[in-house]
Amino acid sequence: MTTNPTLAELADKATATRDRPAYGHDALITCDRLVRVFSVEGVEVQALQGLDLLVREGELMALVGASGSGKSTLMNILAGLDTPTAGAAQVAGHNLLAMSAKDRLYYRRKVVGFIWQQTSRNLLPYLTAAQNVALPLQLAGGRRSRARTERALELLELLQVADCRDRRPHEMSGGQQQRVAIAVALACDPAVLFADEPTGELDSHTAEQIFAAFRTANEELGTTIVIVTHDRAVATEVRRTVAIRDGRTSTEVLRRSEVDETTGNETLVAREYAMLDRAGRLQLPAEYTRALGMRDRVALDLEQDHITVWPDDSGHS
Ligand code: ADP
Ligand code: MG
């Protein structure tokens, strides 16, 4: 005979699970100690070295980092084009390490949308803008031709490139092509858009327009968006910028608006944070450690509400 648990037992159980929530349990994207090693002619390149990243549903965030820091490697994994050597990655409930070929196709068609740096990689050259946007809908099936065209025109309108509907890519500017590419990526209403340096080939004014298009998609459609960029100006337009260094997330800048009580003016206040991993490891910004000559070993003091880090004063070497 089974007996119903008592309230006290239920409460105990609830506390136990609350005390130990799984890493990233409430995130839309979870990367947990991701490692990707490439082997080229017997030489190993560690592109990702235990990268942790959480992205919440509805976020519009930027990933920045020097060339070769692992940004595209991460994007390719999240897009389902590549698999990590170790670690875990989950996007909208899909475990990226355990997808069958069929799951992978579904994932790439319906769950995520992609925009690449090379404008030419995003669109088919012999199709018009409207046909390019309607194509993923046709591949996904389920909509009639007329409904597909309507949806395509709606998206082109939303991204302010409706005038390009009947033009082929070579008849559009780079900026127009990228906005049409965003429409293509949004066609099947994906949970997440990934963009790898989408403004890399464009001038700053055009980059601004592309960024506005991403913001529109985020605000109007609620799509979660992750943009890789090395454009500092673009990075400051989002609330959260995560920096990748040597295949790991290193620091994060959060911006929030503050209203000045006397003038009523709204300003964005930015604050830089360092990542603390589950083992308690912390990466201090190189400018800070260099300024104080810190290396190899530092002294720590626990204060009531903070921790102080001192240069090594032990005299040992
Ligand atoms: P980013 O996009 O930040 O510039 P990448 O992710 O492209 O950096 O590259 C990270 C590192 O991994 C680099 O050292 C790069 O040379 C290496 N790498 C990336 N892709 C491959 C590959 N397919 N084969 C071998 N090495 C690669
Ligand atoms: Mg890259």
Image: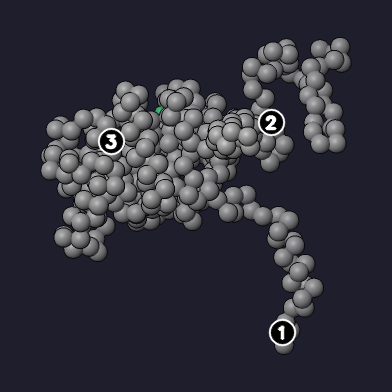
Q: Which mark is residue 282?
A: 2
User: In the image, what residue occupies the spot 71% across and 38% down?
Assistant: 279
User: Hey, which residue is sitting farthest bottom in the picture?
Assistant: 1
Give the Cα distance between marks 1 and 2.
Answer: 48 Å
Residue drawn 17% across the image and 40% down it: 164
Q: Nearer the viewer, residue 176 or 55?
A: 176
Q: Mark 3 is on which residue type?
A: Gln
- Location of residue 316 in the rendering, given as x and y in whole percent from the top left corner: 85, 13
Relative placement, left or right, of 290 versus 158 is right
Identify the residue at image location x=52%, y=38%: 239
Mark 1 closeness class: few <14, some 14–19, many ≥20 residues within 10 Å: few
Tag 3 residue: 178
Q: Position of residue 250 (x, y in %)?
A: 59, 30
- Residue behind label 2 places its C-beta within 8 angstroms of ligand 1: no
Res 2 label: 1
Q: CA distance from mark 1 to mark 3?
A: 61 Å
The answer to which of marks 1 and 3 sits earlier in the sequence is 1
Q: Nearer the viewer, mark 1 or mark 2?
A: 2
